[in-house]
């Protein structure tokens, strides 16, 4: 496994190349999840966003 300093160095290098490290961390977290878990989280997020009026329309599962 990688040590914290190694990981910190990689993020530092990515940042210096113009990458958004917050987004990179989210991408890595998503890669650790299986497809089903990601789909469930997206559906719940869409449901909450819709309830708050932040998006229009029904979540994808309801549209099918």
Image: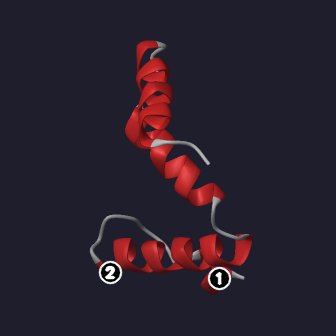
Kindly state the secondary structure of the residue where label 1 is placed. Answer: helix
User: Residue 38 occupies which quadrant of the picture?
Assistant: bottom right
| 60 on left or right of 24 | right
Q: Residues within 10 Å of mark 2 (few under 14, many from 20)?
A: few
Q: On the rendered structure, is 32 left or right of 42?
A: right
Which quadrant would residue 42 be assigned to in this image?
Answer: bottom right
Q: Which residue is mark 2?
A: 51
Among numbered discs 1 and 2, the one appearing first in the sequence: 2
> Residue 46: where, in percent of width, then height?
46, 72
* Nearest to the observer: residue 39 or residue 53: 39
- For label 2, the SS is helix
For residue 1, above or below residue 58: above
Q: Position of residue 7 (x, y in %)?
A: 48, 36
Query: Which residue shows up at 58% across the image and 58% down it?
Result: 30
Most extreme residue toward the top is 17
Circle 1 sits on which residue?
61
**Which residue lies at the image location 70% right of the left edge and 78% below the top edge?**
36
Q: Give the percent coordinates (x, y) of residue 50.
A: 38, 75
């Amino acid at each position: 496994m990688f040590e914290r300093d190694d990981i910190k160095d990689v993020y530092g290098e990515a940042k210096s190349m113009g990458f958004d490290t917050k987004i990179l961390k989210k991408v890595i977290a998503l890669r650790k999840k299986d497809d089903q878990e990601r789909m469930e989280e997206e559906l719940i997020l869409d449901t909450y966003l819709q309830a708050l009026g932040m998006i229009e329309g029904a979540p994808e599962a309801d549209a099918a």
